[in-house]
Image (spheres, rainbow, N blue to C red):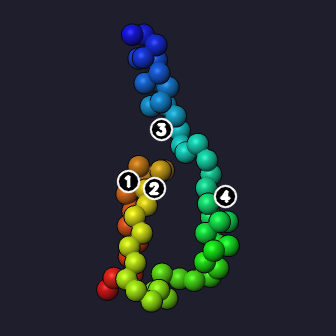
Amino acid sequence: KCSGLWSNIKKLICAITGPKYDGQYLHELIRSQLGDTKLHQTLTNVVIPTFDIRLLQPTIFSSYQ
């Protein structure tokens, strides 16, 4: 049972200290697919749910007016 407690403590410390990855690869992948396209340029309404790992909260991007 102690190993479970230490494992949970380690997970908590990792969550507090920040994300495991910097997101650079994802940014480059999205940029290669979309170029400089902006959300307001979409042909239909778009909703993009995301999660801000630094603030530990969901963020929603939407083109709906």
| Label 3: how many Cα within 10 Å (few below 14, some 14–19, many 20+) | few
Q: Nearer the viewer, mark 4 or mark 1?
A: 4
Q: CA distance from mark 4 to mark 1?
A: 21 Å
Q: Which comes sooner in the sequence, label 3 or label 1? A: 3
Residue shown at the point (46%, 17%) measured from the top left:
6
Do labels 1 and 2 touch, CB within 8 Å? yes
| Label 2: how many Cα within 10 Å (few below 14, some 14–19, many 20+) | few
The residue most toward the top is 1
Q: Position of residue 34 (x, y in %)?
A: 60, 77
The answer to whether residue 41 is above or below residue 28 is: below
Q: Determine which residue is flagged by label 1.
A: 57
Q: Which comes sooner in the sequence, label 2 or label 3? A: 3
Q: Determine which residue is flagged by label 4.
A: 25
> Horizontally, is 11 left or right of 30 in the view?
left
Q: Determine which residue is flagged by label 3.
A: 16
Q: CA distance from mark 1 to mark 2?
A: 5 Å
Q: Choose between 10 and 1: the one closer to the eye.
A: 1
For the residue labelled by badge 2, is the local secondary structure a helix, a strand or a loop?
Answer: strand
Residue shown at the point (45%, 55%) measured from the top left:
52
| Label 1: how many Cα within 10 Å (few below 14, some 14–19, many 20+) | few
